[in-house]
Image: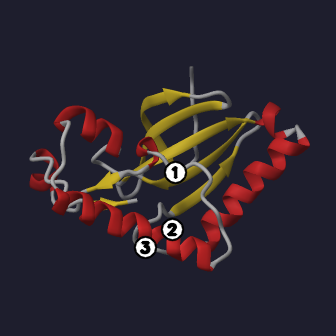
């Protein structure tokens, strides 16, 4: 499968969903990593899906909070729409829990404080998440050593 997203280089396919693929990509000029959610346009022709996708993009454009994924770009090709967002290098909370099984009360409080701050921000903007689950809470580390050591207290939750 050949994927061409102008200005970006595809590093790898992360997963395949019902409507397309999720790619790890990098900006050609800055070599910074991002995620690209590639949605096949055949789904975009369905009015319900078009409304859902347009709403998702609109919300991502409107929000600006340290615990919410940032929209970087939206690219279109003849067959796909690519929603490009920041990349969180620490995986998701479900993967973390599967590996470490148990979290201290201090760690849970730290995580929940960030999740609650994000939800509060969204609710103040009259936005409801509707799919809050461990797989959708991502961890991002600014420091590579914290990422390697899986120091969840140093990672920002998004």
Q: Residue 123's image quarter? A: bottom right
Classify mark 1: residues with Cα within 10 Å, few (<14), some (14-19) or many (20+): few
Outermost bottom residue: 124
Using the image as rendered, state which of residue 130 and residue 67 is in the foreground: 130
Left or right: residue 152 compared with residue 56:
left
Give the percent coordinates (x, y) of residue 114: 36, 67
- Upstream in sequence: badge 1 or badge 3: 3
Q: How many marks?
A: 3
Left or right: residue 133 compared with residue 52:
left
In three-dimensional space, the C-alpha distance between marks 1 and 3, rounded to whole angstroms, equals 13 Å
Q: In the rendered image, which residue does mark 1 sit on?
A: 132
Q: Are marks 1 and 2 in contact (CB under 8 Å)?
A: yes
Q: In the rendered image, which residue does mark 3 sit on?
A: 117
Give the percent coordinates (x, y) of residue 39: 67, 37
Classify mark 3: residues with Cα within 10 Å, few (<14), some (14-19) or many (20+): some
The reply to whether residue 49 is visible in this rendering is yes
Q: In the rendered image, which residue does mark 2 sit on?
A: 119
């Amino acid at each position: 499968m050949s994927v061409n997203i102008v200005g970006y280089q595809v590093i790898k396919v992360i997963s395949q969903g019902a409507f397309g693929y999720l790619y790890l990509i990098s900006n050609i000029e800055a070599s910074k990593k991002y995620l690209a959610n590639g949605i096949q346009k055949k789904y975009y022709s369905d009015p319900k899906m078009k409304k859902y996708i347009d709403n998702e993009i609109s919300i991502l454009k409107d929000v600006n909070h340290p615990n919410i994924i940032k929209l970087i770009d939206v690219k279109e090709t003849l067959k796909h729409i690519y929603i490009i967002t920041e990349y969180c290098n620490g995986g998701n909370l479900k993967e973390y829990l599967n590996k470490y099984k148990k979290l201290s009360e201090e760690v849970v409080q730290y995580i929940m404080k960030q999740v609650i701050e994000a939800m509060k921000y969204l609710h103040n903007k009259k936005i409801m998440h509707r799919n809050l689950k461990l797989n959708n809470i991502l961890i991002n580390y600014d420091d590579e050593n914290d990422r390697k050591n899986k120091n969840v207290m140093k990672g920002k939750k998004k």
